Image (cartoon, grey):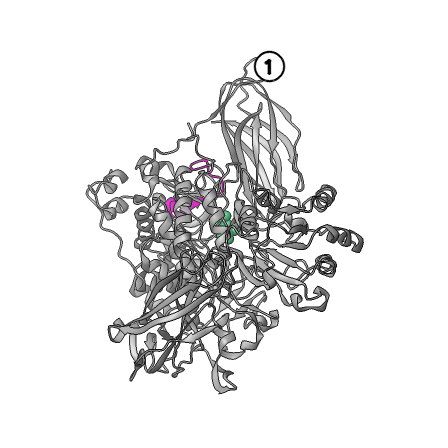
């Protein structure tokens, strides 16, 4: 019997989402005190998204079934004193009835990223302006996996209709605020255009705030909460200004020529004039004075800590919070350094007018060491602090800073300090050049190019030198998992007794919508074969995603604000608390690994998944990764850091190679992962779809073994992304779905996913067993991954749960339809569900024999491999099973949709909630 709480949200999460969503909104402009709205104001709200308010992005990063979601009007309804222009609201409501929200047909990744906007006439706006003095315009955008944003209207740019709306509204309203209910930063240069009449007085990025987004936005607009979010990305005047502009969007590979100069690291060093709103920027309704108290160093050498004392005073009229940031300006040395690098930040508590708070920001100097990938400093493959004077700056964004003054220089090195020596790993093979600061001219550095150091190590030798020995055969072969959990038998002995078939089943996850775990989730893994169940191996449940639990078969959960919003809160404690609650909701729903947080770096504004990720800055990314992981760990469950690493483009995401220097990899793209692993709460990581420096990360030996386990000491599991491609662990080349030998050799432990019930029979036809026979994979390597998985399972709540036995669903025949039994043991019927179908009328099936039946379907989809679709099968109005598929490239597959106990008689079969893209040709009842 399923626990009644499964498939339901935990009530305590939503109110906290409202708090979090308000804390991450960023006020970019507020002239003349336009906001907050006052009692005497009469407010007109424009833009359909006041009603069709976005709560999250699309795809796995946003697909949460919710019980409700608030829009801006709902939110303002909490404040009856707000004087809203009701006529205008009615106009929008009526228009939306005739122009309903378009979801693109409901298929995978089909939702458009903007919606048609209501055309506004001069007459209407003029009329509205007679009775309203302030206007609010809501601009909405969504985004999601499998596609990038485009430098086009409706995506990164405004549509003509939106421009027209802003143009007409600002013509009649001298006080206009624009709310950006968007997933990613969008072009903001239009705010400077004449057609805005200089009347946009306020700009507020509210992002996607989850189910409580509308309430949170209203809290901000009315001044119940003063904005305190700061940008976790730089907003430049133009897309062309971003350093990745000419190396983004290719189909085969992208050269990361900007190297470590991502975001503000680039702009502050080379071209500060291109920045419209700097990284770290954000206003409040109040004002603050930030005063330096003390700047000093504690300790010496690599043990040194930089300690900066700061006093923040609220000098305005509203209560509010301020974010203080500390940047280092390291000597250029031989490596070259960004002009500023964020090394610490802190947010005050809510300060009442006149109130002050003192903060102490302490930073280990090792945090800002640079990686020498060429040997130019004399220490190749080492983190070093080059000699010279390190200057520190404090401020409320990366531009508006003051240098920390101290009696003596805070941190000056007479000679280079080696912080950590490691081994060269994951270096590029393809030659290219990268940028570096040259001479200083007018206060900024010139850009010069240098060749990127290429791989020098012998990868084959490295792998063969580190092959794990097979485990010695134990005396007993009946050791149970429980004995290991209780410390009565060793993990090694337990693993050693497992057959190749059992071990191979363990490294294959199954899904989606496996009936061995919480319905509608992304995967089951661990004890997913009968043999493993008999040994007591638990089955763990993995579910999307970063903004709440995704249960595709209808279960509801709380949708959280998106990652970018959370990072903009600059408040790690807040996010830890949010994920502590989220962790409790996971425990209630029997989910052992959330497939999030997503912690890739915002390399370029057009990445379609930026909304799931935190920031362009690796330190900010690391802090929020830690916050999420710590929160979930406290609740007794865990997250999955993804996507490891360099998943920075969705276009052609299985193929496009991220080609970058080892320095950029380590200082920028891996830093957040490293910080989180080092903190200690991480036990699950997902690799990317895309290759990096020639290797799909699912077979990246240096990434998964040399760096992650060897250098960082990680002990948890590594899983692939869903239906990921794997290429040869040595030769690279074209990726395949079935090269699990290369996956295991790299120590990516679990393949996600094979068909439900497919792990034990190797339904995908992977090469584990043949590779073992050929000797290109060793038993020791297979056992090593199995042990990583078992170690993970021991620590999960899955190991305390009774295994979910799949019982047949009992369905009675239609009343009065009992038929005379005879010997037919299977029935097959054509059902013909087409690609674009979303409903299916019922068909009648006659069962002639009492018994337990496997209900099989012939299924296919012409969509791409990672498209996800499903529908639900009902017999006599009783939900009997889920039919789930990913894109099959047009090939037909047979799949078990349900197991049912039936008596002879007539059954009416209906398919409900059919997600377009799925095709079903036959249904078959086979007696089990
Ligand atoms: C996404 C992952 C997600 C997985 C399972 C993939 O398409 O890239 O981030 O966790 O699906 O839904």
Foreground of the two, 918 or 437: 437
The answer to whether 548 is drawn above or below residue 388 in the figure is above
Q: How many C-alpha atoms fall within 10 Å of the one at disc 1: few (<14), some, or many (≥20)?
A: some
Can you identify the residue that label 1 sits on? 817
Q: Position of residue 308 (x, y in %)?
A: 34, 70
The answer to whether 906 is drawn above or below residue 225 in the figure is above
Q: Can residue 802 be seen from the camera position used here? A: yes
Q: Quadrant of the N terminus?
A: top left
* Residue at mark 1: C-beta within 8 A of ligand 1: no
Q: Can residue 748 be seen from the camera position used here? A: no
Q: Position of residue 596 (x, y in %)?
A: 44, 51
Q: Is residue 516 magenta?
A: yes
The extreme right residue here reads: 123
Check disc 1 and report its element: helix, strand or loop: loop
Q: Position of residue 512 (x, y in %)?
A: 49, 42
Foreground of the two, 818 or 775: 818
Residue at 66% from the left image edge and 68% from the top image edge = 192
Residue at 47% from the left image edge and 35% from the top image edge = 8
- Give the magenta-colored segment's residue range: 504-518
Q: Position of residue 681 (x, y in %)?
A: 33, 53
Find residue 373 and report its image quarter.
Answer: bottom left
Instruction: Please indicate whether residue 40 sits to the left or right of residue 98 in the image.
Output: left
Foreground of the two, 5 or 161: 161
Q: Is residue 591 magenta?
A: no
Instruction: Please indicate whether residue 95 sits to the left or right of residue 719 in the image.
Output: right
Q: What secondary structure characterizes most of the magenta part?
A: loop
């Amino acid at each position: 019997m399923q626990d009644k709480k499964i498939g339901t949200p935990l009530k305590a999460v939503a109110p906290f989402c409202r708090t979090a969503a308000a804390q991450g909104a960023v006020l970019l402009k507020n002239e003349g005190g336009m906001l907050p709205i006052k009692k005497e104001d009469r407010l007109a709200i424009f833009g359909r998204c006041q009603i069709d308010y976005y709560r999250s992005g699309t795809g796995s990063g946003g697909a949460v079934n919710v019980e409700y979601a608030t829009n801006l009007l709902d939110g303002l309804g909490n404040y009856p004193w707000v004087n809203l222009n009701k006529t205008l609201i009615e106009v929008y409501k009526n228009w939306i009835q005739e122009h309903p929200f378009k979801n693109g047909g409901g298929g995978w990744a089909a939702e458009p990223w903007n919606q048609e906007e209501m055309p506004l006439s001069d007459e209407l706006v003029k009329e509205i302006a007679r009775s309203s003095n302030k206007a609010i315009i809501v601009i909405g955008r969504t985004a999601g996996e499998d596609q990038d944003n485009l430098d086009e209207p409706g995506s990164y740019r405004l549509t003509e209709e939106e421009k027209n709306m802003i143009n007409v509204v600002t013509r009649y309203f001298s006080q206009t605020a624009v709310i950006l209910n968007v997933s990613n930063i969008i072009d903001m240069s239009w705010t400077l255009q004449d057609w805005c009449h200089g009347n946009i007085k306020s700009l507020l990025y509210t992002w996607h705030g989850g189910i409580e987004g509308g309430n949170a936005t209203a809290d901000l607009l009315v001044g119940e909460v003063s904005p305190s979010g700061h940008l976790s990305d730089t907003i430049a005047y133009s897309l062309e200004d971003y350093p990745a502009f000419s190396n983004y969007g290719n189909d085969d590979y992208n050269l990361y020529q900007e190297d470590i100069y991502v975001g503000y690291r680039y702009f502050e060093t080379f071209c500060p004039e291109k920045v419209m709103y700097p990284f770290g920027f954000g206003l409040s309704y109040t004002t603050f004075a930030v005063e330096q108290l003390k700047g000093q160093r504690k300790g010496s050498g690599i043990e040194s800590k930089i300690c900066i004392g700061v006093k923040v005073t609220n000098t305005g009229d509203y209560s509010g919070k301020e974010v203080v940031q500390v940047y280092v300006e390291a000597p250029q040395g031989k490596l070259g350094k960004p002009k500023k690098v964020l090394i610490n930040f802190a947010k005050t508590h809510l300060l009442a007018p006149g109130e002050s708070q003192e903060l102490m920001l302490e930073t280990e100097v090792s945090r800002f060491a640079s990686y020498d990938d060429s040997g130019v400093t004399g220490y190749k493959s080492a983190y070093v602090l080059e000699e010279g004077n390190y200057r520190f700056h404090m401020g409320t964004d990366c531009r508006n800073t003051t240098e920390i003054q101290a009696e003596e220089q805070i941190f000056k090195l007479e000679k280079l300090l080696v912080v950590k020596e490691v081994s060269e790993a994951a270096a590029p093979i393809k030659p290219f050049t990268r940028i570096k600061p040259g001479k200083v001219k007018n206060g900024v550095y010139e850009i010069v190019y240098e060749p990127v150091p290429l791989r020098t190590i012998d990868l084959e030798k490295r792998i063969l030198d580190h092959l794990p020995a097979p485990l010695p055969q134990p005396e007993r072969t009946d050791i149970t998992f429980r004995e290991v959990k209780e410390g009565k038998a060793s993990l090694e002995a337990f693993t050693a007794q497992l057959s190749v078939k059992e071990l191979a089943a363990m490294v294959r996850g199954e899904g989606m919508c496996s009936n061995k775990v919480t319905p509608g989730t992304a995967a089951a893994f661990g004890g997913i074969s009968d043999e493993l169940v008999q040994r007591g191996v638990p089955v763990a449940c993995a579910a999307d995603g970063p903004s709440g639990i995704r249960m595709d078969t209808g279960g509801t959960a709380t949708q959280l604000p998106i990652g970018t919003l959370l990072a903009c809160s600059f408040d790690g404690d807040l996010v830890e608390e949010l994920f502590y609650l989220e962790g409790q909701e996971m425990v209630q729903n029997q989910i052992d690994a959330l497939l999030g947080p997503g912690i890739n770096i915002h390399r370029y504004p057009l990445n379609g998944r930026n909304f799931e990720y935190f920031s362009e800055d690796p330190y900010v990314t690391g802090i929020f990764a830690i916050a999420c992981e710590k929160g979930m760990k406290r609740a007794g469950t865990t997250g999955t850091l993804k996507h490891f690493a360099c998943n920075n483009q969705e276009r052609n995401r299985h193929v496009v190679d991220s080609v970058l220097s080892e320095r950029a990899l380590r200082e920028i793209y891996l830093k957040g992962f490293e910080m989180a692993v080092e903190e200690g709460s991480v036990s699950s990581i997902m690799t990317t779809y895309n290759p990096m420096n020639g290797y799909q990360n699912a077979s990246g030996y240096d990434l998964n073994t040399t760096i992650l386990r060897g250098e960082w000491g990680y002990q948890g599991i590594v899983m692939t992304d869903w239906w990921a491609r794997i290429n040869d662990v040595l030769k690279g080349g074209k990726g395949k779905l079935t090269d699990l030998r290369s996956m295991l050799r790299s120590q990516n432990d679990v393949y996600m996913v094979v068909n439900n019930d497919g792990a034990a029979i190797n339904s995908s036809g992977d090469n584990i067993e043949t590779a073992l026979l050929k000797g290109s994979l060793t038993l020791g390597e297979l056992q090593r991954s199995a042990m990583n998985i078992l170690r993970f399972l021991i620590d999960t709540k899955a190991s305390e749960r009774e295994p979910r036995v799949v019982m047949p669903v009992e369905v009675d025949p239609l009343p009065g339809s009992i038929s005379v039994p005879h010997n037919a043991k299977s029935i097959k019927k054509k059902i013909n569900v087409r690609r674009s179908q979303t409903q299916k009328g019922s068909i009648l099936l006659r069962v002639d024999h009492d018994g337990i039946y496997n209900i099989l379907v012939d299924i296919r989809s012409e969509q791409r491999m990672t498209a996800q679709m499903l529908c639900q099968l009902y017999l006599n109005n009783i939900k009997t099973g889920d039919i789930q598929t990913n894109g099959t490239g047009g090939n037909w597959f047979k799949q078990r949709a349900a197991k049912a106990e039936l008596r002879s008689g007539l059954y009416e079969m209906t398919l409900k909630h059919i997600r377009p893209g799925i095709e079903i040709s036959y249904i078959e009842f086979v007696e089990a």
